[in-house]
Image (cartoon, grey):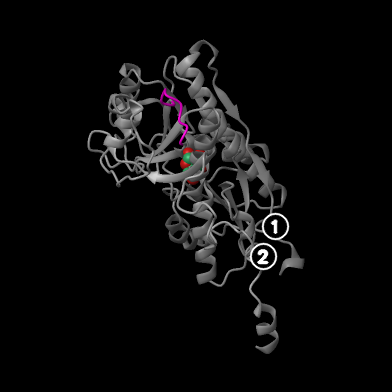
Amino acid sequence: AGSRAGIFSHRPDMGSQPGTKQQHPHHGHHQKGHIGQNVMAAEDLSQHRNGTHTGNGHAREHFGGNAGGAALILQEHVHDKHRSAAPRPLVGILLPDISNLFFSSIGQAFLLEARAQGSDAIVMVHGDQPGQDLANPDTLLSRGVGGVVMVRSARTTPEEEDTLREKILKSRIPVVVMDRKMDIPNVKSVLLDNREGARMAVRYLLEQGHTRIGCITGPLEDVVCRERLLGYQDALEEAAIAYDESLICQGDYRPEDGVKYLPYLLGKSVTGIFCFNDMISLGVYTGCRAYHLRIPVDLSVIGYDGIPFCETLDVPLSTVEQPVEEMGRAAATLLKQMMYQPQCAQDRLFLPSLQIRASTASPADPSRR
Ligand code: RIB
């Protein structure tokens, strides 16, 4: 204990670390260009629209934005005493949830790029509820939102997708579809090659010697999941390994899915699990701890998305990393084109990258036993 106390006896020099309590010389005044995240009430949004918003940052939480749908509206305030007379354009990104670091990373990249391009930006969350994705696009327009990037719900049925498609086609607000593809005339998208990403992950496990690889997916009505499942099947076919549908477990992109399906897949004698996102992988980790299983000695795990902290887990997670920074920036740029130069707007398709870390290994690797 003494030696350990020695290690922590001194507090690292806080210096001018962000978040320290040091009194800034101008504490309490908003420096030019100071950015603070505020929740902005609807009326503040309308003031913002006609440029009367004082930018004083007094805002209240506003829930129930789009036609009663629960929408938490976050407004990135630019406290700029020298705000130009014309209000900056306001754009939005509509995300399923920001508790998943994949979406919060996308939202962050979009916000910062939109601001760098001279727009203010808001993040809206629809809770992954079908029908709430873009509850009422013209409400957004009436609140001064000039364009929106939308990641729709993963559990949208074909009928709900048709309704959403009609809504977008009839709405006057420019929309960019992101992540979850929708084929809508004149609507541009920022997408990932999900099938290739899955193929890379499963091909790697097969090259490590795995032949029984379980899958824990997101909602299979979601085109993203269907593409990833196709990539899984492609890799098996390339290796002449028969597809076994009993190794596929449909989840909901949540850690609970990993905990729930681990015992079943162990019972099917899998030596590796391909999780359709990193959040599910975290659940598999939890389950392995409960069963005293070692990753990767007893089980290899590979995820999808590449959310922050994958590499800081006690067993750093191998994953299919999505280029979220580039995708978020591309969404902001494409939306600006859709708003002002629609003739220049082009779909964007990104490739993921395979990040191999400590959570995957050969199933028969004696050195790890
Ligand atoms: O983690 C959430 C998943 O849903 C991601 O893989 C993303 O592609 C979205 O579709």
Please report whichever mark, 2 or 1, sits nearer to the chain's N-terminal start: 2
Q: Main secondary structure of the magenta part?
A: loop
Where are the magenta residues, as a range? 81-88
Q: Nearer the viewer, residue 136 or 11?
A: 11
Q: Nearer the viewer, residue 293 or 248?
A: 293
87 falls in the magenta region: yes
Looking at the image, residue 289 sits to the left or right of residue 135; the answer is: right
Q: What percent of the width, then of the height, locates residue 135? A: 29, 32
Q: CA distance from mark 2 to mark 1?
A: 7 Å
Q: At x 59% / y 55%, what residue is drawn?
A: 309
345 falls in the magenta region: no
**Quadrant where the C terminus is found in the figure:** bottom right
Instruction: Please report contact status of discs 2 and 1: CB closer than 8 Å, yes or no.
Output: yes
Q: At x 49% / y 33%, what residue is drawn?
A: 179
Q: Which residue is mark 2?
A: 297
Q: Is residue 181 shown to the viewer in this render?
A: no
**Quadrant where the N terminus is found in the figure:** bottom right
Q: How many discs mark residues in the rendered view?
A: 2
What amino acid is labelled 1 in the image? Ala
Whether label 1 lies within 8 Å of ligand 1 gets the answer no
Q: Is residue 220 above or below residue 2?
A: above
Say what secondary structure mark 1 lies in. Answer: loop
Q: Is residue 313 shown to the viewer in this render?
A: yes
Q: Quadrant of residue 52?
A: top left
Q: What percent of the width, then of the height, locates residue 231? A: 58, 37
Q: Which residue is mark 1?
A: 361
Task: Name, please, the residue furthest toward the top.
Answer: 343
Q: What percent of the width, then of the height, locates residue 235? A: 63, 39
Task: Name, please, the residue furthest toward the left.
Answer: 68
**Within 10 Å of the Cα at label 1, are there few (<14), some (14-19), or many (20+) other Cα atoms?**
many
